Image (tube, rainbow, N blue to C red):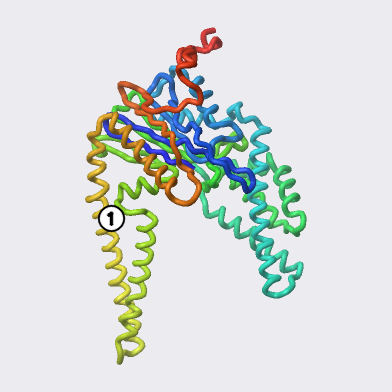
Amino acid sequence: MTAEIAIMNKTAVALATDSAVTIEQQEDKKIYNSANKLFSLSKYHPVGIMLYGSADFMGIPWETIIKIYRNKLGKQKFDTLKEYADNFVDFLDNGNPLFPDYEQEKYLRGTIFGYFYQIKEEIFEEVRSTIGDEGRIEDSQIEQITSDVIERHHDHWNTFDLLPSIPKTHTKDIINKYGSIIDEVKNEIFEELSISEKSSEQLNEISASLFSKNLFSSSASGIVIAGFGKKDVFPVLKSFSLEGIVNDRLKYREDYRAEINSDSSASISAFAQQEMVVTFMDGIDPFYRRYNENYLSEIFDKYPDIIVERIQNLSESERKALKENLKQESDIMFKEYREWEGKYRIQNHVNPIINMVAVLPKDELAVMAESFVHLTSFKRKITMGAETVSEPIDVAVISKGDGFVWIKRKHYFKPELNPYFFSNYYREDDDEKE
């Protein structure tokens, strides 16, 4: 996990991110505090990119992908930040040679294997539960459980839409092109079970849905692209979720967009672990607030019943009518409470901070962004659990006139011992000169 912050006003956007990366192997877990998650997307123009979630994509570190893209981009510039973001996504999509067919097949096989294994575990769990309740189980019961669990997953995936960027033929194309691989995984995972023809078809459709529907796994990567296009007067930010490439199509969606304009003079956006930023902005911990609202909802829901039960000498029809009236009033009161609470938070906590951010100079934007990440890191340090957010903190400020400027940046080497690294940064490749 990680904590990333983007703070924007009409002058600039400040980006800050921690350095923690979690490496997991089977049941073991190791956290390193040396990951790079903040980069300039262009060497020459005011655009930056932050990463969260998975540290690599299709087996390639994101840092490598970004630097290959940056070299390819060169001095090319776009009129809007949206075009930079779209160009980066297009770089990954539609057959990038970084992700050849055999890598796509490997990714597809691993993803389907993991999901089918999850289905099998659910089947075995229901089988064990039936044996525990009845002392035995028939083959016909196992077949029915298998069919029901597969159908349940199939129905679940059908509730999600195809991603806008995915062609309508993509699911059929996946089944046709990778059908033999899907069958191999089915045979390997469900070899002990009897799979009906209907269930087999449903498993095929589930396999295709994994790479085309608007549902992303916890292993997805998040990217945040922020800065200015040539014609952007004020900063713009866009974030995406990306999961993988199959049949030369990238599975991705746009999650969030923020921009500064005449109606919005400041913005604070948090990504990945957001709770400390939300607590600071709203004046209340988001988990506590949600718990409090759920508890109050139960009280408002139960209280009409309690009142009616205390009133004597009412007929059954009178009790029913009174309960309905009280519940309607209770729902109205709870709705009014939530509206009042929301307005109070915005007027007394959120707006005062946003109004101050709107007038902060560039250096103070950087300090504020760093402080939010530090606050999250400090919370992780003094509470039980893994320190999934930790220092050092990388900070950059992007402005229209000054471009991408590092405020704080860690190096895995001593800068004073490697002057050639900086002198070579803007040097064109020999191939480009030719």
Task: Say which quarter of the image contains residue 332.
Answer: bottom left
For the C terminus, give its image quadrant: top right
Where residue 265 appears, x then y in whole percent? 25, 37
Q: Position of residue 234 (x, y in %)?
A: 30, 30
Q: Which quadrant holds residue 22?
A: top right
Element assignment for label 1: helix
Q: Residue furthest top?
A: 434
Residue at image coords 70%, 54%: 200
Along the line of sight, which residue is nearer the eye, 25 or 338?
A: 25
Query: Within the image, what quadrant is residue 301 found in?
Result: bottom left
Residue, x 35% and y 62% (percent of image)? 293
Where is residue 409 drawn, in percent x and y? 42, 27
How crowded is the residue under tag 1: few (<14 C-alpha within 10 Å), some, or many (20+)? Answer: few
Question: Which residue appears farthest toward the bottom when viewing the image?
Answer: 313
As drawn, 406 above or below 181 = above
Number of residue marks: 1
Asked whether residue 335 appears in the rendered view, the answer is: yes
Q: Give the x, y percent position of residue 125.
A: 66, 63
Horizontal relation, residue 319 to residue 132: left or right? left
Residue at the spot 26% in from the left edge and 53% down from the top edge? 345
Q: Is residue 8 left or right of residue 106?
A: left
Relative horizontal placement of residue 262, taking residue 185 as reference (left or right) = left
Q: Nearer the viewer, residue 371 or 321?
A: 371
In this view, the residue in front, 158 or 92, is 92
Is residue 165 visible to the viewer in this orientation of the structure?
Answer: no
Q: Disc 1 designates what residue?
A: 342
In the displayed structure, 66 sits above or below 378; it is: above
Q: Label 1 sits on what residue type?
A: Gly
